[in-house]
Image (cartoon, rainbow, N blue to C red):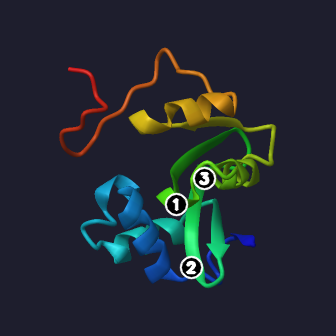
Amino acid sequence: MIEYKLGTDMMDWQSLLEMYCAVDGVIGLAKKGELSIIKKSFLNTYKVVTAWDGQRIIGAGRMISDGECYGWIHDIGVLPTYQKKGIGKHIMDELMKDETLLFGLTSSFVAEEFYQKLGFKKHKTAMAKYPGNSSYLEE
């Protein structure tokens, strides 16, 4: 049975790192073993949701927010063997419980359909500035 937890109080940081390594999440920081950066970013996050199968994190996501106007969703990931079972949707539902916020996110190319099913649409004027090169940016 999958259990969902809010917050970071009971976080198994190594399990979180392993899950993100498997899905190449957190802008590649997991594969680089940058656990201290991941931990600091999660501890400074407005809302964190994790999905657990026993003692193992199998999915996670977080939202950066001012709590009043905007919620920006980041780092949604679910282990490949657990995908297409409603876990990602449940994580998103937990993150978006406050329906008064405007929610935004950036998607990997393979996850666009997932977010579209949840009612997200492409934003015509979104822009980004990355610290390095990215296939997500237009020239």
Sequence order check: which comes first, mark 3 or mark 1? Answer: 3
- In the image, 12 versus 78, the foreground residue is 78
| Residue, far front | 81
Sequence order check: which comes first, mark 2 or mark 1? Answer: 2
- Check the image and report above or below for 79 versus 39: above
- Check the image and report above or below for 125 versus 41: above
- In the image, 30 versus 44, the foreground residue is 30
Q: Nearer the viewer, mark 2 or mark 1?
A: 1
**Label 1: few (<14), some (14–19) or many (≥20) C-alpha neighbours in 10 Å:** few
Label 3 secondary element = strand
Q: Contact (CB < 8 A) between labels 2 and 1?
A: no
Write the residue at 63% across / 63% down.
Answer: 48
- The answer to whether any part of residue 30 appears in the image is yes
Left-right relation of 61 to 125: right
Instruction: Locate residue 80, reporting x and y percent.
Output: 48, 57
- Check the image and report above or below for 112 versus 55: above
Instruction: Locate residue 79, reporting x and y percent.
Output: 50, 61
**Label 2: few (<14), some (14–19) or many (≥20) C-alpha neighbours in 10 Å:** some
Alpha-carbon distance for marks 2 and 3? 21 Å
Asked which quadrant contains residue 99, the reply is top right
Q: Contact (CB < 8 A) between labels 3 and 1?
A: no
Quadrant location of the C terminus in the rendered image:
top left
- Check the image and report above or below for 41 versus 83: below
Q: Nearer the viewer, mark 3 or mark 1?
A: 1
**Label 3: few (<14), some (14–19) or many (≥20) C-alpha neighbours in 10 Å:** many
Write the residue at 45% across / 68% down.
Answer: 19
Q: Which residue is mark 2?
A: 56
Q: Amino acid at mark 1?
A: Thr
Q: Amino acid at mark 2?
A: Arg
Q: Which residue is mark 3?
A: 63
